[in-house]
Amino acid sequence: MKQLRNYIDKIKPNFSEGGKFAWLGSTFEGFETFAFSPNTVTRRGSHVRDAVDSKRAIFTVIIALIPALLFGMWNIGHQTNIATAANWGFWYEFWFGFLRMLPLIVVSYVVGLAIEFAFAQVRHHEVYEGYLVSGLIIPMIVPVTTPLWQLALAVAFAVILGKEVFGGTGMNFLNPALVARAFLFFSYPTHMSGDKVWIAADLWGSDAITGSTPMGEMAVSGQTSASALDMFIGTIGGSTCETSVIAILLGALVLLITGVASWRIMLSVVLGGGAMGLLFNAIGANAYMQMPFYYHFLMGGFMFGAVFMATDPVTAAQTNCGKWIYGALIGIFAVLLRVVNPAYPEGMMLSILLLNCFAPLIDHCVIAGNIKRRKKRMEVKA
C-alpha cells in the first residue's frame, strides 16, 4: 500500500490545477479517495469529526449485502438445477449462479460509474461513492435473465433522470435502485411483474423457463406450494437476491450494530405491513386476505426493501417521528397493493417510491407540529 501511495503522490501534480491532465482531476480524485482516505482537513469553523464518514457507511452497506448476494448466487443455480433436473452439487450450483450474476454486476457498475464520472468532470466536483451501493443492489433485485442491454438502459435512466438531474448524490428524492427497477417494470413488464420467475436453463441464458413465485401463486389461487420455512430460508423462485429472509436479517444486524440504518424505519415497515395483514385477515373476503399476515414478510421483496431500500438516508424521512410514519405507511401500502390490486403483485417497490415522494412532507408536518406545540408551551408559561 505504501508503494501505491507513493505512486499516486508522484502522478498527482499532473491532475492538479495547472497539470496537463487537470481536466481529469475529478476522476483522479475519485480513484484516490476510493483507495485511501482524503488527506484534506477542515481548516476553519466548528465541525463534528467522526470516524464514520460516507465512505465507511457505504462500505458497511456493501458488507451487509454480501449474505443476500451469496445466497442469491447459490439459489440461481439451485432453482435452475431443480427446473432442469441437472443433478448438480452445491458448489456447481453456486458457480453457475456466480457466472450468471457477474455480467449483471459488471454492466451495472460500468454504466453507472461511467455516467457518475462524466457528470463529475462536467460539473468539476468530486466523485461520490453513493453509486457503489446502488450499483450492487440493482442486479440483486432484478430477474437473473434480464438482458444486459435492458439493464444498461435502466441504470442509465436511474442515474441520469433519477439522480444527476437533481444534483447528484444526496440531492435525489427517489431511490436510484428502485428507479431502475421501476423503469424495467413499466418498460418490460413480462419479465418484471413479480408473479413469474425466469430461470436460465443454460449458463448464458439462451434458453429459459418460467415458473410461478409464491406471491404469484397467492395472487392467482390464494394458496402457495412453498412452506413458510422454505420462504424464510429462501429456497424459492423470485428476484435474484430477495428471497432469503435469513440472509437479509444478517445484513440488517450489521446495519443496526453499526448504526448505519434506522431501526425505526425497519421496525415500522414490519409493523405497518403486519397491521395491514391482520386487517385483511379480519375481513377475510377471499383466500388471499385469509393468508397468515406474516407470509407477507416472507414473500417477494418485502424484507429486502424494508432493510436496504426504505432505510436509504437520502430518500427517507429524517425526523424520528417522521421515520415511524414513513416506515408504517410503506408497510401498509405494500400489503394493500399486493392484496387489492392484482396488477402489481409485488407492491414493495411502488410503496417505497411513493413514500420517497412524501418523505419531505412528512418531515415538514412533524417539524411544524413540534414548533406549534412549543409555542403553546411558551404561551402557557408566559
Image (cartoon, rainbow, N blue to C red):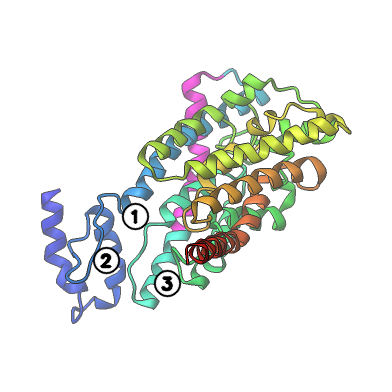
Query: Image height check: is 94 above or below 48?
Result: above
| Location of residue 159 in the rendering, given as x and y in whole percent from the top left corner | 51, 63
User: What separation in Å lies between label 2 and label 1 (alpha carbons)?
Assistant: 19 Å
Residue type at mark 2?
Answer: Phe
- Label 1–label 3 contact, CB within 8 A: no
User: What separation in Å lies between label 1 and label 3 (alpha carbons)?
Assistant: 20 Å
Q: Main SS of the magenta segment?
A: helix
Residue type at mark 1?
Answer: Ser
Q: Which residue is mark 3?
A: 119
| Location of residue 350 in the rendering, given as x and y in whole percent from the top left corner | 67, 52
Residue type at mark 3?
Answer: Phe
N-terminal-most mark, 1 or 3: 1
Q: Which residue is mark 2?
A: 28
Please tell me whether mark 2 sits on a helix, a strand or a loop. helix
Where on the picture, by quarter, is residue 241?
top right
| Residue at the image point whose x is 40% and y is 45% from the top | 260
